[in-house]
Amino acid sequence: VTLLIKTDIERGNAWADALTANYPELKTVNWPYKGDPAKIDYALVWQPPRGELKRYPNLKAIFSVGAGVDHLASDPDLPEGVPVVRMVEPGLTAGMSEYVVLAVLNHHRFILDYAAQRREKVWAEIPQLPAEARQVGVLGLGVLGRDALETLKPFGFRLAGWSRSPKSITGVTCFHGSGGLGEFLAGSDILVCLLPLTAETTGILDKETFAKLPAGAAVINVGRGGQLVEEDLLAALDSGHLSGATLDVFQKEPLPKKHPFWTHPRVFMTPHIASMTVPESAVRAVVANIQRLEAGEALQHVVDLKRGY
Ligand SMILES: NC(=O)c1ccc[n+]([C@@H]2O[C@H](COP(=O)([O-])OP(=O)(O)OC[C@H]3O[C@@H](n4cnc5c(N)ncnc54)[C@H](OP(=O)(O)O)[C@@H]3O)[C@@H](O)[C@H]2O)c1
């Protein structure tokens, strides 16, 4: 069984080592691959060039290195009928929940304000609010959104979530569909976006959405840059309607040097690192899935390409 790896070179080697340790019969080859394309059974990829995966006539499954599959779903030349599997692995989930807690607490505890005060050498207290005075609303109740909400539970925030289909989660007020979005937003003092990038979610964080949030709300985007209308966010921050934003993903990455986000005092940003797949734990998920398919069983976490996630 041969698997083609296309990630960055350093991480590609970490993957190859971890895969072979977990599945000695598996042969791994790195992209770019100059051998016979017919020999490739599986591909484990991050942002492959468009049309690249069509070159392998015997491909049985495509594994995304990341949880998001927009890098694959947007390829018009993806080979037809080959299942695409998204990444679900404990290291990635834990990393995202850590980041969401960090960002929520930053806004809750006025860290942007204290950073501004520090720059001005101002020693002043801002009255602290109890966690139950705020509602954290998470857009997207998938693997990552649900775990982030579970991880937030001990802090005592009121919790809400929004998804496409109805959900029932203990301790979380659940909303769904376009009909439920307005009420969900109206209660969200801290809004976290953990949606996949699809035609429906593109530009969802726009001026209409921001206008529905309570005055002083904060926005955390850890989904995809394409979900945020950046100029609408800047306008909502500059008008004071939003108190701050934590951004990990951007329309254009790396963020251009002249972009106002770099220096905006109400923005905390990171370079798309909210969570990374951990090869050592992720290989167990990939190997188990390959073994399932080789044994004639169904793959887990197959993406619905029509839906886009
Ligand atoms: N910044 C980073 O470092 C980083 C790292 C990993 C992942 N991510 C992003 O996080 C995303 C979520 O990952 P995941 O594993 O949690 O995905 P997932 O398990 O597929 O969950 C997606 C959730 O979004 C909801 N959803 C999708 N389209 C919707 C729509 N049009 N309206 C309302 N809800 C919608 C789904 O609703 P249903 O439950 O009703 O289907 C589901 O609850 C990824 O796609 C990726 O873009 C970012």
Image (cartoon, rainbow, N blue to C red):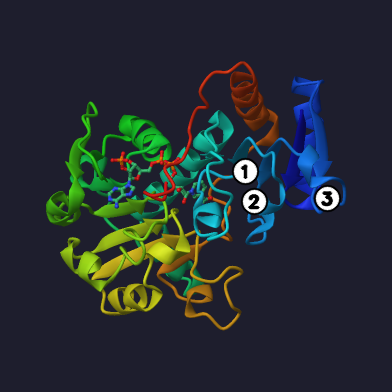
Q: CB atoms at circles 2 and 3 under 8 Å apart?
A: no
Quadrant where the N terminus lies? top right
Q: In this view, does 276 lie to the left or right of 214?
A: right
Circle 1 residue = 65
Labelled pair 1, 2 in contact (Cβ < 8 Å): yes
Label 1 CB-ligand 1 distance < 8 A: no
Label 1: element kind: loop
Q: Does residue 248 appear left or right of residue 34 in this picture? A: left
Identify the amino acid type marked 2: Trp
Mark 2 near ligand 1 (CB under 8 Å)?
no
**Up/down of 286 relative to 24, above or below:** below
Q: Mark 3 points at which residue?
A: 33
Density class for disc 3 (Cα within 10 Å; few <14, some 14-19, many ≥20) is: few
Q: Mark 2 points at which residue?
A: 46
- x and y percentages locating residue 239 in the rendered image: 26, 79
Q: Nearer the viewer, mark 1 or mark 3?
A: 3
Element on which disc 3 rests: loop
Query: Which mark lies nearer to you, 2 or 3?
Result: 3
Q: What's the distance in space between the residues labelled 2 and 3, CA to CA? A: 15 Å
